[in-house]
Structure formats: C-alpha cells, structure tokens
Image (cartoon, helix red, strand yellow):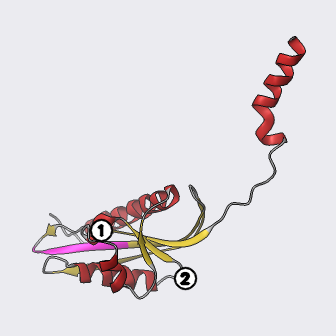
Amino acid sequence: MWVFLAVNFYFTIHKNRIFSPRVKYNMWDIIPVDISGRHRIKGGYYMVCAAAALTVSADHIEKVKQIKILPLWLKRSPSLLDIVQLVEDTADQLSFEGMIVAEKGDMYNRPLWMPESMFSRAFKYQESIAERRAIELVHHISLSARNLLINELQIEA
C-alpha cells in the first residue's frame, strides 16, 4: 500500500517534467500600442504613443524586439483619425511586420470595422492573455514617457 501511495505521489508531482513531451507553442508577431494623455493640459493635448515589436504565445510575451515612443501636441481634442495617424506613425518607426493590437477604449469604443478600415496594416482589438499583457507593457511605457517628458519640458497641469 505504501509503495503504491509513494509511486502515485511521485507521478502526480513530477509527471509534467518526466512524461510530458516538449510542446511547441504557436507564436505570432504583434505590435501592441497605447496612448497616454488624451486629456486637456495647458490649453492643448500632450499625448505619447508607445508601440512595441513583440512575439507572443497564447498567454506570454516571448520576445521584445523593439520599443518606440512618439509624442504629439494638439491644440484641439483628438479625433479618431488623429489617434489612428499617431498609432500608424509610431508603428511605422518599428522595423517589424506585425498586427497592431490596441484596447477598444483607445479607439473611442468604435466597432472593429471602423479603425480597421483606417489603418494601412492589419489591426485588431486585444483578445488573448498575451495581448492583454503586451498592452499593459506599452501602457506603462507610454505613461512613464509622458510623465518624464512633462517634467523635462516643464509642462504643468
């Protein structure tokens, strides 16, 4: 009886390492984007867009290849076309072909067909866990870059 329990415990704990073959996960290239600063500051809108060239699997960021940021100052409130142009310009700085992925809120909660028809490359809203993590990554980059630039350029609220 004890031998059976010990063997059963061993296989329960260690079965993933011993008996599972190495699984190759599908990976794909994406360009997650995020924009910080779509609110009024000193008579205008100081926005920073961050884009990253990533390879992801279903639930992990596998590789970070490049990161770019692009600031933009507008005197009027940004429209969807302004946001699409800023995202497109930032993604064009990357020497990387991948699908642009964004949060639905960054595109003013418009249906997918609307921003998708405005981009010159493939676009989609986030779906997988890895895409959510990638957008979190570029969100931290865009917010930090915007805060740094506001402090360095002495733009105060």
Asked if marks 1 and 2 touch (Cβ < 8 Å), the reply is: no
Which numbered dot is residue 97? 2
The quadrant of the image that shows the N terminus is top right
Is residue 65 among what the camera can see? no
User: What's under tag 2, amino acid-wise?
Assistant: Glu
Dominant SS in magenta: strand
User: What's under tag 1, amino acid-wise?
Assistant: Asp
Under circle 1, the secondary element is: helix
**Image check: 106 left or right of 129?**
left
45 part of magenta stretch = yes
Identified at 45% across, 61% down, the residue is 127
**Image check: 146 left or right of 93?**
left
48 part of magenta stretch = yes
Identified at 82% across, 24% down, the residue is 8
Residue nearer the viewer, 26 or 153: 26
Residue extent of the magenta highlight? 43-49
* Image quadrant assignment for residue 123: bottom left
Which numbered dot is residue 154? none
Q: Earlier in the sequence, mark 1 or mark 2?
A: 2
| Residue found at the very far bottom of the displayed protein | 120
Q: Position of residue 34 (x, y in %)?
A: 36, 68
Which numbered dot is residue 106? 1
Q: Position of residue 93 (x, y in %)?
A: 46, 84
Residue nearer the viewer, 16 or 135: 16
Residue nearer the viewer, 123 or 91: 123
**Image check: 34 left or right of 76?**
right
* Image quadrant assignment for residue 89: bottom left
Identified at 76% across, 29% down, the residue is 12
